[in-house]
Structure formats: structure tokens, C-alpha cells
Amino acid sequence: MELLINLTVNGLATGMLIFLLASGLTLIFGLMSVLNFAHGGLFAWGAFSGVWFYTISGSFIIGILGAILTGIILGFITEKLIITPVYGNHVQQILITLGFMLVLAEMLKVVWGPNQIAAKVPSYLAGSWEFGDVLIIKYRLFIIIVGFVVFGIFQYMLQKTKIGLIVRAGVMDKDMVQSLGINIKRVFLYVFMAGAALAALSGVLFAPYSGVIYAEMGFEFAILAFIVVVIGGMGSFPGSLFAAILVGLAGSYMAYYVPALSLAVNMLLMAIVLIFRPQGLFTAKG
Amino acid sequence: MKNKFQWNNLFLAIIVIVLAVFPLVSDSRTWTILLTQIFIFSILAMSYDILLGYTGIVSFGHAMFFGMGAYTTAVMLKRMEPTIGVFILSIVCGMLLAALISFFIGLMTLRLKSHFFAMLTLAVSGLFLVLAEKWRTVTHGNDGFTFKAPEFFKDRMMFYFVTLICLVLVYLLLRRFVNSPFGRVLVAIRENEQRTKSLGFNTLHYKVIASVVAGVIASLAGSLYAVSLRFVNTSVLTMDITLDALLMTIIGGVGTLIGPIVGAGVIELAQHYLSGLAKEYPIFERWIIFFGIVYILAVIFFPRGIVGTVREKFWKRKTKTRPLGKEEVS
Amino acid sequence: MKTLLKVDGIHTHIGQYHILQGISFEAREGEVSVLLGRNGAGKTTTLKTIMGLTPASKGAVQFDGQEITKKATYTIANAGIGYVPEDQGIFGDLTVEENMKVAMRKEDEAAFARQDYVLGLFPDLKKFWKKDGGHLSGGQKQMLSMARAFVNDSKLLLIDEPSKGLAPIVVEKVMEAITEMKKSTTIVLVEQNFIMASRIGDRYTLIDDGETVHAGDMADLIRNEEIKRKYLGIG
């Protein structure tokens, strides 16, 4: 029982980090059918810049804010420089975003050196709570809470605010949205920046969770995020939460019970979904 | 037309002869090794061009076939005897394995839209990497293992010739392939898959075969690569290999076959010099950034790459290459 | 009467297909101009080209004295053109209310007054106010799409085949609404149903194979059996 709870908390925490990464990816894809292969790079930049802000200021909160700011700025640059020139051409988009991923990962090494960097959990989130036999690590719970709060905020925005409605409408039919007098490209820029901010947030939260950060982490996590986007359905925000938790939990249980298969399970899950239900479990299209 | 074709061939023949004579007149070990490396990566990049340049498929998992060849050859040479016979057998086995795997992956995934396919190949090749890392009894994981190359290759020059011959054969074979009626259908798929389908072609069938051909050739490159190093580890399965193939193809020129060879040369040479420079200026340790930037600029501004652009500018003829991707027709 | 929209010899390519090969017509203020022609003649593409969704490669579109040929779709819409596409373009996951909200550019009193007015024309929409757009019937979707285009103070409405696939009684309602809307705005209508078109149209433009072949007063066309037979297969 104790083990099960621990594995579940662990899986949920990982799932939330993947969700933060995947949610931006899925909205960007849903709105503009751009699959951003550089998204993992934004994640890694969030981690490195966040840890840097955290180290120099001594405050984890400032680290998080710094990471989000970095994400927003990089999101703006990426959208303007990388996505806009090849808008509408899928092959070019795939190639160019992958190239940018490469540049982002290498730039990390230029700025912070090629070695991995240690990241500590801030003192007030360190340690764990005991409930009888069950030990809950504070930081993991913190990640889970942040994940749900972000989900709540974004879900509220998507459901209740005008910009949210426009984003959802754009996912369904962007020509129509433009015909109603809305500059969808600007909306897309905002969504891209928000997605990048979420990726960066995910990165900075990941840093103390894993203890170390390294330039290649972007790639590894991006693959998980892609899997989530496929399983959850491209463009579906709740779908990405569901799929991220699924992937997180599956990874956590498998890592304990059948460690060799932990990554394979997710790939398999994705392959099955793609073959039998290529639109994903949730769909965003009306 | 015929005349130009012959001029082309003559030009290529001269280059091949120069390359063949080169090690006989120069005893630079560095150059022999560097050129061997270029030949091997040219083969890999050409195989990638079949997918990207001729069929318009973006695969992010090409390293898995390269790795398959490398591991098959390494394991067989280590477990059996390091003879030419085993070497050839291992190449054949690697190719068969690559053919089988690429066939099944292609069958399952090539129906999907471009980004799904790219993503899935990324994931599957990631799976192979994990497999190689975990299956330590055979692969020794990340540490890898060394093995003996056949006696015949003790002389670097011999191996140089073998790779050069392989390169020429693969080039001629692939050129035939892309100029065949089959190859023309591939180009039609690249230009407009929907229309090709409506003309009655089973495009999936063509795409699967293209990916099998690409996989098999990549496996050959992997086999040669392993022997050139007499060592193999999981790095042959990493994204870096796929990225190399991608950079070489894009920078050299997609859909030209010669382009990937030029790209392989440019990148390997530049890598060689830049890593030399890195000893003095540490910034050059990050040489991949320069390529990343050049690559991004190429995708935006020179989607035809070096060869495509040069052909367009100087030969003034209508080449079959088109910029990457196609207009979406609603 | 003032010319509100002037389409001057436009050519449009979609992919490698040359769809429009010289379309010209004018829409005068306060009138209903009908685009007629066979299936695939290029009527829908003409509307899309005016909206900037499939930009013209040649020719010019002028709206209200302004050149809008190369403008972005949203700019064209903001200049005062409302668009009701053939497939209605309803956001299926959004409720009727939310569909209207996305459409409303300025949420001011005037806009709400227009919304109330248009909901008066289509009481069904009021009834299904909280229902998802995707769950509406074909006729209700048509009404919602028209209401959405009308809620902004558009000088011109482009309506693409509003009667398509609807039951006769619903078509009747839609046509009544268009007649009503005509009082406050100019309309360009694509319509296959000639009886409907002739009832509400003031002017007509006949399109065939991507070209304008005839134009004039609707009243003249009603009398001209030859043209009707040749291009519309009726008469």
C-alpha cells in the first residue's frame, strides 16, 4: 500500500511535468498545425535559466519567474524567426524546428558549460510528510499542486475568456476565425509564447525534482510530450492532462515492476493509439 | 540531353579516379581516415535523401538502421571470426534485419501524416537506443566494445578502397533506382501524394519500399562505420547520427544524390577543422551551432541546398529538385 | 446608387489549379447581388477571394473605395464584410452564445442591440442559446452563421448557398431573414436555387468556368429563357 502510494505520487508528479510541456505543444499544434520539435529545447532552457536565477537570487520563486520570463522571450523569438517564415509548409516546419532544437541545446552548453548542473530543492519544500506508514515527499506534492493549478487557470481561460474562446474556435476552424475579423497569427503568437512559458515552467520544476539538469534533457522529455500529445489528441487541452497522467503513472509503475519496459510501454501505447485512433483519445475538432 | 548526361558521368568518373589515386600518392593517414569517414557518411546521407529528397518523408529515426548495421557487423565479427567472409555475411544480415524492421515500421506508420510519422520514427529509434543500452550481454551498453577487423583491413588503404567502391556502387544503384519508373512515382508522391493516389498508385506500397531501400543502405553505412572504428557503442543509435544525415542532405541539396555526398564532405571537413580550431578557441567546441544555424538558414532561404542551388544558377536547366515540402491544397 | 464592392478581373490559383480566370462584378449599396452558375463554376472561390482566404493572383477587389485585394482576411473582415461560408463554419465545441461572442468584435450596446435584433429573426437560436454549435440542425447552423456575420456592423454580407441541404420550410425562413437583413446592409449571395435567387435578388452575375459571362438586372434574367437554359439548365 505504502509503495503503491509512493509510486502513484511519483507518477503523478512526472505526469504533471509532462503535462506542462505537452499542453503548450498540443495547443500550438491544434491552432496552427505546427508540431514544434524545438519544444524540448524551451524546456531545457527553462531548467537552466531557472536554476541560474534561483542560484544567484537564492529564491526558488524568482527562479521560477525567471524561467517563465525566459520561456516567454524565447517563445517570441522562436515564433517570429523560426515558425513564421515556413508557415504552412509541414516538411519545412519539422526540419526547421528540429534544427532550432539543436541550436537551443548547444547554446545551453555555450552559456552554462557542457557539464550537468546540480539543482537543490528549496529548504521549505525539502523533506517529506509522514502519514502513518506513508511518506509523501513534499516537492513531489508541490509539483502535482502546481500542475493542477496551471491546468485550472488555463482551463478557465479557455472556457470563460474571450481569448480562450478564440483559441478554441481557431483550433476548430481558423479560416472562419479570421473571417470574423480576428488576427489569428497574433493569437497564435500569444499561444506560442504561453506554450513556451509552460515548457520553461516544466523545466524549472523538473530541475530540483531530478537533482541534476543537462542539455540533452530537452530531447528526452520532448519524446514523452509527443507521446502525450498523440495519445491525448492533438489540440485537446484536457486530453493532454489525461494522457500525461497516464504516461506518468505507467512510467512510474513500470519502472518499479518491469524496469526494462518502462519506456517501451509508452511507445507501445502511442503506436496503438496512432494505428487505431490516429486522432487521439480526445478530439478538439467539432 | 544525352550529351550532358555523358559530361556529367565523365566529371564524376574523374573525381572517382582522383579519389582512387589519392592514397597511392599521399601517405597522410589523417586524410585517408577523413575521406573514409566522408564516404561512409555519404552513403548514409544518400539513403536519407531517398526518403527526404525523393519521397518527401521526414524520418527522425534513421539512426536505428545505421545502428543495426553497425551492431550486426560488430557482434558477428566479435563472436565469430574476424574474416572477410564473416564481414560480408554480417553486412547481409544487417541489411536483412534493416529491411525487415523498416518494412514493418513503414507499413504501420507511413499512412500517417508527416508530423506523426516524424514523431513516431523518433520514438521508435529511441526505443532501439534503450534496447541497446539495456541488452548489455550483447552490446555492453553505453561503454560499447572493441572487436577485431578482418586482417585484410589492417591496411587503412584497403578499407579506404572498399568504402570508395561501396560509395560508387551505392550511388550508381540509387541513381538507377530514382530514375526508374518506380523512382518517378516517388517524386510524384513528394509533389502531390493525393493526386498520385487518385491516379491509381498505391502510394503506401511505394513509400514502404522507399523506406526499406533507405533502411538497407543506411545499414550498410553502419556496418562500414563500425569496422572503420573497430569499436561500437550506443552512440551509433543516437539522434546525432540522424541529425548528421539530415544536415548533410539539406546542406548538400535534397533530391540530388550528389548533394548528400557534397554535404557529407563539407560537414566532415568543417567538423575536422573546427574541432582543430577548438583547441585554440573553445567556442569552436560548439561547432554544431554553426551547422544548426546554417541548416536553419538553408531550410528557409536555400531549400535546394548547395547542389540544387548551383545547378539552378549555373546549369540554367530545370532540375527535378523542388524546395522542401509542398503547398497544401485544400 | 453607390458601388460598394467592385471585383475587377480577378484570377485565383489554388495549388496548381487556375480556378478563377477573370471574374468581374459590382455590388451596389442596399442591393442583393446574386452569383449564379453551375457547380464548380467558381462562385464559392469568388467569395473566398473577396475575403482574402484564397488571395487573387491578378485583378483587384475594391470595397467601399478601399483596395482590399492583398489584405489579410481579418483586415478585410474588419473593413466591414461579414462572411457566411458554404459549410457555415460553426465552431462545434462552442455554444451558440460563445459562437456569437467570438464573432462580436466590440461588445458595446450597439452590438448587443444588433444581436437582439438578429435573435428576433431567428428565435431558434435564443432557444438553444447554451447548446453546442455542433449539435444544432442544419437550418439552425445556417441561422447561427448568418447571425454571427450580422452581429458586427457589416456593410456587406457574403452569403454562400444558404439554402443548401435545407428543408423547404427552413429555406423559407432563411430567405425571409435575408430579405429583412437587406434593409440594413448590402448582400452578395451565391445561390443554386434559381427560384429563391430570383425572388430576393436585385442584380445577377453569371459565372461559368471561372469567368463572368453575363450580368445585369435580375428582372431581365427572369425573362431571358436562352441564358437560363444555356448556363443554368432551366427554363
Image: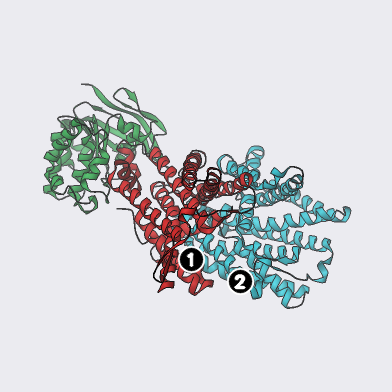
Give the CA separation, mark 1 to mark 2.
21 Å
Count residues near mark 2 (Cα–Cα under 10 Å), then give few for <14, some for 14-19, many for 20+: some
Check chain identity for marks 1 and 2: say if they share one.
no
Mark 1 nearby-residue class (10 Å; few <14, some 14–19, many ≥20): many
Q: Amino acid at mark 2?
A: Leu
Chain B: colour as depicted: cyan
Q: What residue sits right under mark 2 in the picture?
A: B97
What's the residue type where badge 1 is placed? Met
Towards the viewer: A226 or B47: A226
- Please name the color used to draw chain A: red
Q: Which residue is at the front of the view, A180 or B316?
A: A180
Quarter of the view holding residue C74: top left
Q: Position of residue C91 (x, y in %)?
A: 28, 48
Left or right, C178 with respect to C92, comes to left
Give the numbered dot on residue A267: 1
The relative height of residue C143 versus residue B62 in the rendered view (above or below) is above
> In green, which chain?
C
Q: Nearer the viewer, residue A212 or A25?
A: A212
Q: Residue at x 31, y 35 (%)?
A: A181
